[in-house]
Amino acid sequence: MMGLRLNIMALLLHLSLMLASTAKGQSIFDITTYGAKPNTDITQTLANAWKDACTSTNPSKLLIPTGVYQLNQSILHGPCNSSIEVQMEGTLQAHPDPIGAGLVLFQYIDQLTVSGTGAFDGQGKGCKKNDTHLNKICNELPMNVRFSSITNSIVKDITSLDSNYFHINLLSCKNVTLQNVTIIASENSPNTDGVHVSRSEEINILNTQISTGADCVSVGGTNKQIVITNVTCGPGDGISIGSLGKYTKEREVTGVAVKSCKLINTWNGVRIKTWPDSASAYTASDLHFEDIEMVNVSNPIIINQEYCSSNQCNNKIPSKIKILNVSFKNIRGTSATSVAVKFICSKDLPCEGVEVADIDLAYNGVEGQTTSHCVNVIPIITGKQNPRACVEATPINPPSTTD
Ligand SMILES: *[C@@H]1O[C@H](CO)[C@@H](O)[C@H](O)[C@H]1NC(C)=O
Ligand SMILES: *[C@@H]1O[C@H](CO)[C@@H](O)[C@H](O)[C@H]1NC(C)=O
Ligand SMILES: *[C@@H]1O[C@H](CO)[C@@H](O)[C@H](O)[C@H]1NC(C)=O
Ligand SMILES: *[C@@H]1O[C@H](CO)[C@@H](O)[C@H](O)[C@H]1NC(C)=O
Ligand SMILES: *[C@@H]1O[C@H](CO)[C@@H](O)[C@H](O)[C@H]1NC(C)=O
Ligand SMILES: *[C@@H]1O[C@H](CO)[C@@H](O)[C@H](O)[C@H]1NC(C)=O
Ligand SMILES: *[C@@H]1O[C@H](CO)[C@@H](O)[C@H](O)[C@H]1NC(C)=O
Ligand SMILES: *[C@@H]1O[C@H](CO)[C@@H](O)[C@H](O)[C@H]1NC(C)=O
């Protein structure tokens, strides 16, 4: 009697797990079975479903089916008991009130997958650049999706729309791949960087399309082994290493490879930017840009060690960030301004080991050719050179005697 009952219970348990599991053996946690309904706020429901999915000892899948769901800033944190996938087929939409309207912070999770054809919609309207009061608020606005202390994880296929501030932020992550992601914001929305990476290592950003009002991808301080491949940017501000040196706690940046990317109508192309009078002093090395196509880009190739937004710094004190071992290879297309190659290196710490090879950038304007402008750098130049980089041969200034 007892044995039979146990057998039936085992069979029922087995059946129910089979019904709610995928080919990969994941247990499924569908937010609609937790009561989530399209066009309602699902903040509490999502939290409940996440708790069950995260504590599952089987690999789990949190499913957000097709539909638009409203969400308040949510923290989905681990550690979880097994690998976890968040499959987004629907849209998670922030409330339109700009303050506090970030969407999701994923934190302390190993083996996370975020997948699906759905979207994170921040409903950001964009701050107006000419309004100083709003601009202050702009810098305090929330990001659409944050990944903090995430390891061995993949984010794929999803879309991020109209963030109020950065779209996707990776902080203290290791071995995370973003691929086939789409990021869209208005050209008139400042600080809506597509992907910002800091304090991370082994990050891959692949096969992604980014249109925003700010940097397409920005690599901040304390990073290593960052690979950016087949990313299409524009409109926006191009692919940027930096700005570096604004904060005291920043450390070395090493190993950034940007390859096979296309920039269309961006204000900058591939760029390294550091603050003068830097709050920290370290090396940024092994930074490589290769096989890049430019379409009407305003500053296609640029190192700027006097980067200073909104006059927040003293331009007279040279940058304390040492730029070392950088290459720009096979960069082609059109420049919207005549100065297609601009290297403004630090007076105290001239750039070293800069290689420029096979550059072919035509001026998109009415008359003339592209030119270059170089300060405190003597690059190694090979292959085709249009413009010829650093012809004016500005001597490297002796280091200043002041500290
Ligand atoms: C989310 O925010 C909206 C608008 O501020 C509010 O009406 C709703 O109650 C919040 N939901 C939760 C679960 O906090
Ligand atoms: C699940 O993870 C929690 C938190 O890490 C841990 O306390 C718990 O023992 C784990 N449960 C199982 C069954 O492994
Ligand atoms: C890329 O993402 C889109 C949109 O989510 C999806 O339709 C497409 O199948 C994905 N492509 C690949 C190669 O996975
Ligand atoms: C400033 O922004 C407002 C709001 O978008 C706009 O109406 C106004 O024309 C702008 N003023 C200037 C000087 O750009
Ligand atoms: C990086 O993460 C991926 C995805 O989880 C995993 O397959 C791979 O083994 C990880 N690599 C290392 C070196 O741990
Ligand atoms: C580059 O990325 C696009 C999506 O943005 C994709 O369609 C294309 O197949 C990728 N190319 C390669 C060579 O992977
Ligand atoms: C090229 O870029 C300039 C400056 O951003 C812009 O004014 C112009 O309209 C662009 N030209 C084309 C053909 O897109
Ligand atoms: C810079 O490049 C030189 C020559 O290739 C190499 O010896 C040196 O180790 C590199 N330094 C860094 C910090 O990458």
Image (cartoon, helix red, strand yellow):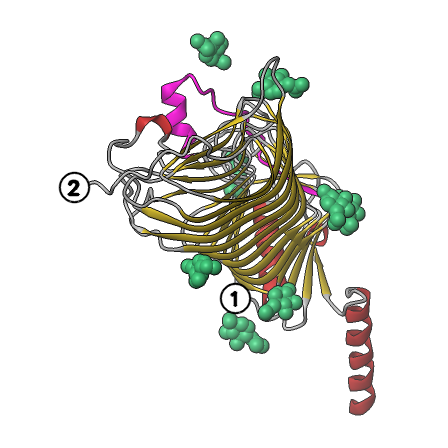
Q: Is residue 159 visible?
A: no
Inspect the magenta stretch and tell me whether residue 147 lies in it. Answer: no
Q: Residue, x 61% and y 60% (percent of image)?
A: 153
Give the label on residue 321, or none.
none
- Who is closer to the viewer here, 393 or 354? 393
Determine which residue is flagged by label 2.
402
Is 170 left, or right, of 156 in this rendering?
Answer: left
Point out residue 284 in the picture as x, y percentages from the top left corner: 41, 51
Please, is residue 267 above or below residue 257 in the view? above
Please, is residue 124 above or below residue 197 in the view? above
- Image marks 1 and 2: residues in contact by CB distance under 8 Å: no
Indicate the amino acid at tag 1. Answer: Pro
- Badge 1 residue CB within 8 Å of ligand 2: yes
The residue segment tinted magenta is: 117-140
Q: Is residue 108 visible?
A: yes
Determine which residue is flagged by label 1.
79
Please, is residue 281 above or below residue 85 in the view? above
Circle nearer the N terminus (1, 2): 1
Is 95 left, or right, of 351 in this rendering?
Answer: right
Is the C terminus in the top left, top right, bottom left or bottom right quadrant? top left
Point out residue 285 in the picture as x, y percentages from the top left corner: 44, 53
Q: Secondary structure at mark 1?
A: loop
Point out residue 87 in the picture as x, y percentages from the top left corner: 70, 53
Indicate the amino acid at tag 2. Answer: Thr
The quarter of the picture where residue 330 lies is top right
